[in-house]
Amino acid sequence: MKMKSILTLAALMLTAALSGCVSVGPLFTDSYGSKMDAGYQLPAIPIYKVPEQYRRREVSFPTGEEPGTIIVDTKGHHLYFVEGGGKAMRYGIGVGREGFEWKGTTRVAMKREWPTWTPPSAMIKRQPELAKYREGMDPGLRNPLGARALYLFTKHGDTGYRLHGSPEWWTIGKNSSSGCIRLMNQDIIDLYDRAQVGAKVIVK
């Protein structure tokens, strides 16, 4: 290998190491196919259309947080589930658009499979056409919360924010939500199975 190539490779490895996130595991490309889930036929995601950095992957992620902690990097559009041993499962996410960004430390207070979606009053005021869902939108493939939802609370109560699935896989890696953190449906199912009620969630 030529010296120039060696130096280039070393620089790339150093950059990755300094970022605290070096890929150590394979991409879970095969896990985005169609599947039956709780009576719903979850559509396949054309994962080749999703940038590689937003596909589920185990990565090195040294942190002082306890295993089971969830760390959300809104700027990088990634969510990390801390596994311990300096590793984490990384997921691509969609985050709040301009005016709907937030940060802080919360906890998972509840978990729901195929949840009902109830738009908040402020959203209905902005989008009056959502008034028909004031009492809740039934679960299903078109429901904005997707296949799973983790409800975020602080000591003061419900934040109104969720970690949830979304049928709009093309919004992953973008600022497009009203503040909630959205994942591809196949990814939120994976996270749901890993995360426990009471888990700490840090949104940066």
Image (cartoon, grey):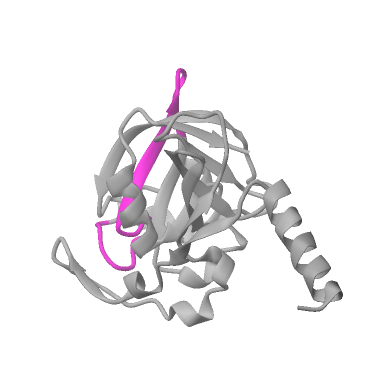
Question: Residue 198, how many percent across, how many down?
Answer: 35, 27
Q: Nearer the viewer, residue 178 or 64?
A: 64
- Residue 66, by quadrant, is top left
Question: Residue 151, how many percent across, how many down?
Answer: 38, 38
Name the residue: 39% across, 35% down.
68
Question: Residue 34, how many percent across, how many down?
Answer: 27, 76
Q: Nearer the viewer, residue 30 or 16?
A: 16
Is residue 125 placed above or below 63 in the rendered structure? Answer: below
Name the residue: 38% across, 59% down.
187
Whether residue 117 is visible, yes or no, is no
Residue furthest to the left in view is 39
Q: Nearer the viewer, residue 16 or 202?
A: 16
Is residue 120 placed above or below 197 in the rendered structure? Answer: below
Question: Residue 144, how many percent across, how many down?
Answer: 39, 59
Name the residue: 82% across, 78% down.
2
Q: Nearer the viewer, residue 19 or 6?
A: 6
Q: Quadrant of the N terminus?
A: bottom right
Is residue 160 placed above or below 76 in the rendered structure? Answer: above
150 in magenta:
yes
95 in magenta:
no
Q: Which residues are magenta?
A: 138-159
